[in-house]
Image (cartoon, rainbow, N blue to C red):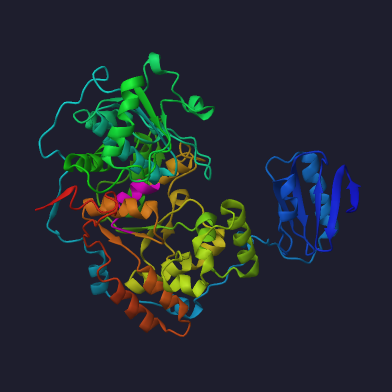
């Protein structure tokens, strides 16, 4: 039997010389566990009892991470134990790379990039807007509007429940309108599920202007904000507790229009209502009538407008990026911008960098990001806990993944890409991101290259951000809005935000840089490459990746490639 020791009401379980578990209850099925490391760090895990043996601790020094549900007494005991077991000479760090000193991986390139110079001619070419590419927007029905049926005369009410983040839900909303049109049904404003990662319970009306949404689509489908009293029982909770005849849970990914007519129409006819969950990515991009395709784009590019306070905050941020000297103040309801109209300087230009480098992406990529053994072990454990180790990329080496372009760019690498393309240290860079894995330590090299880098917190006060604080979807909406109004947009890795912005900016003929992930992976593997050769390779590899229109191929998303479905040749 393993030895137990009780100190200040806390049980300690010594498992081997490297660390100690301690917890306040021996009978609890879900134990709050601390790892007490030989070098002095404390880390808290919450695991079910059967998972006790799977707990993995990592050696590090001097950092204590406390669970938010800990009571004061247990926290105090943890602190006392930490002081007893921790040598005072240890520097503050943790097994988590967010708290470690992360060193640049491409120091030779970084040193040259910091000293780079860009000619006026290069700058002019870099910031020059895209020329007309011979396409115009076409989202109106080719046959003209056909008045939708009233709710009483439609086939019934269609509900959809959408999971994912802001951009995945946005695509789901567009598909829901299309499916309602296919079924001749009345759409209920879509229900947005709480995101399990960000824990954001924001609803459709918290993010989008619902009245604008209904008005723009009034000639296409019938939409209601809420179900009538007769159907008020059809809720998320109702479908969560039992199998229901009105719920459709078998919709295949990228289902055809005929699938909905054959499988959902009978439910509407029988019950007057059908609820589809899950619904993300549940409508095909191919073999759809032209009017349905154009309707999907109409929703995406015209009907989905953010609520006023998001637009106001976004406009203020854009203004402060273009006119850095502008002053700001907050009105009683919405943000207002106060700037001098006389003698106002010419509007400056800025780049939006979408930097998705969170722990989820880092772990799922199975790539090595230079955080050493601690980082590798932490990400391996995360993969095991979240995906039970079933990550496709895990079967490849880091070199193989980089050669295939499967590794997301780190802040350092995306900074080197932008520097090689000609963006100098006077570039105003807006960082659109939620949480970067590694924190400020990981971002420091990017900031060294672009000292004028800004984000929501640096450009808007805490008071101005009060309406979006702690709400991941609303913060993402602000970033989305600013990205739509930037001169140039670039994303450090493929994903829903990248895809959404490529589509939006293609539709508006705005410059978007698409990193050549395969090329960059190979370049960064070559540790002997100097700055001149690196820059030449980067420039040559991105000549045709800066906003040139690409038409959609089979199986590609209409929201990423709106031509030719929603754009016509001029």
Rendered residue at 25%/61% (across/down): 547
- State the residue in front, 479 or 31: 31
The reply to whether the magenta stretch includes residue 488 is yes
Residue 117, visible in the rendered structure:
yes
Rendered residue at 53%/42% (across/down): 196
| 197 left or right of 311 in image | right
- State the residue in front, 328 or 82: 82
- State the residue in front, 413 or 321: 413
The reply to whether the magenta stretch includes residue 79 is no
Q: Position of residue 457 (x, y in %)?
A: 47, 49
Rendered residue at 25%/69% (across/down): 544
Tell me where residue 161 sits by quadrant. top left
> In the image, which residues are magenta?
479-489
| 366 left or right of 210 in image | right
Q: Position of residue 538 (x, y in %)?
A: 34, 75
Q: Position of residue 78 (x, y in %)?
A: 80, 49
Residue 326, visible in the rendered structure:
no
Q: Is residue 214 above or below residue 486?
A: above
| 292 left or right of 204 in image | left
Among all residues in the image, which is located at the extreme top? 230
Q: Position of residue 265 (x, y in %)?
A: 30, 28
């Amino acid at each position: 039997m393993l030895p137990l020791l009780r100190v200040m009401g806390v049980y300690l379980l010594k498992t081997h010389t490297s660390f100690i578990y301690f917890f306040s209850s021996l009978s609890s099925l879900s134990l709050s566990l601390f790892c007490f490391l030989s070098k002095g760090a404390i880390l808290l895990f919450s695991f079910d009892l059967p998972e006790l043996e799977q707990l993995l601790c990592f050696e590090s020094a001097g950092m204590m991470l406390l669970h938010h549900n800990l009571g004061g007494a247990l926290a105090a005991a943890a602190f006392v134990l930490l002081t007893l077991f921790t040598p005072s000479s240890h520097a503050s760090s943790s097994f988590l790379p967010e708290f470690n000193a992360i060193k640049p991986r491409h120091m030779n390139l970084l040193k040259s990039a910091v000293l780079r110079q860009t000619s006026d001619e290069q700058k002019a070419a870099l910031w020059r807007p895209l020329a007309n590419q011979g396409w115009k927007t076409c989202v109106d029905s080719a046959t003209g509007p056909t008045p939708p049926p009233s709710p009483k005369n439609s086939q019934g009410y269609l509900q959809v429940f959408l999971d994912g983040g802001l951009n995945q839900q946005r695509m789901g909303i567009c598909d829901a309108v299309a499916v309602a049109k296919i079924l001749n049904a009345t759409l209920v404003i879509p229900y947005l599920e709480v995101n399990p990662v960000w824990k954001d319970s924001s609803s459709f009306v918290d993010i989008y202007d619902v009245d604008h949404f209904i008005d723009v689509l009034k000639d296409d489908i019938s939409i209601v904000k809420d179900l009538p009293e007769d159907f008020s029982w059809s809720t998320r909770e109702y479908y969560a507790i039992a199998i229901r005849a009105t719920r459709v849970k078998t919709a295949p990914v990228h289902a055809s229009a005929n699938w909905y007519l054959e499988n959902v129409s009978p439910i509407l006819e029988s019950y007057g209502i059908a609820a589809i969950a899950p619904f993300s990515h549940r409508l095909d991009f191919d073999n759809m009538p032209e009017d349905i395709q154009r309707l999907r784009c109409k929703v995406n590019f015209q009907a989905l407008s953010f609520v006023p306070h998001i637009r106001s905050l976004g406009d203020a941020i854009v203004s402060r990026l273009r006119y850095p000297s502008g002053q700001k103040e907050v009105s009683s309801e919405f943000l207002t911008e106060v700037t001098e109209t006389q003698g106002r300087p010419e509007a400056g230009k800025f780049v939006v960098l979408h930097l998705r480098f969170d722990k989820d992406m880092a772990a799922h990529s199975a790539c090595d990001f230079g955080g050493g053994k601690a980082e590798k072990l932490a990400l391996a454990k995360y993969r095991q806990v979240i995906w039970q180790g079933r990550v496709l990329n895990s079967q490849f080496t880091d070199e193989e993944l980089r050669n295939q372009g499967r590794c997301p760019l780190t802040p350092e690498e995306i900074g080197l890409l932008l520097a090689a393309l000609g963006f100098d240290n006077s570039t105003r860079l807006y960082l659109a991101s939620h949480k970067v894995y590694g924190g400020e330590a990981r971002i420091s090299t990017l900031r060294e290259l672009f000292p004028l880098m800004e984000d929501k917190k640096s450009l808007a006060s805490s008071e101005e951000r009060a309406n979006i604080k702690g709400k991941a979807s609303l913060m993402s909406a602000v970033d989305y809005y600013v990205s739509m109004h930037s001169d140039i947009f670039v994303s450090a890795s493929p994903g829903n935000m990248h895809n959404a912005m490529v589509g939006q900016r293609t539709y508006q003929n705005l410059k978007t840089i698409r990193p050549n992930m395969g090329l960059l992976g190979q370049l960064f593997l070559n540790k002997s490459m100097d700055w001149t050769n690196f820059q030449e390779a980067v420039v040559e590899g991105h000549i045709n990746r800066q906003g040139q229109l690409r038409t959609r191929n089979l199986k590609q998303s209409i929201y990423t490639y709106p031509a030719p479905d929603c754009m016509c040749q001029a």
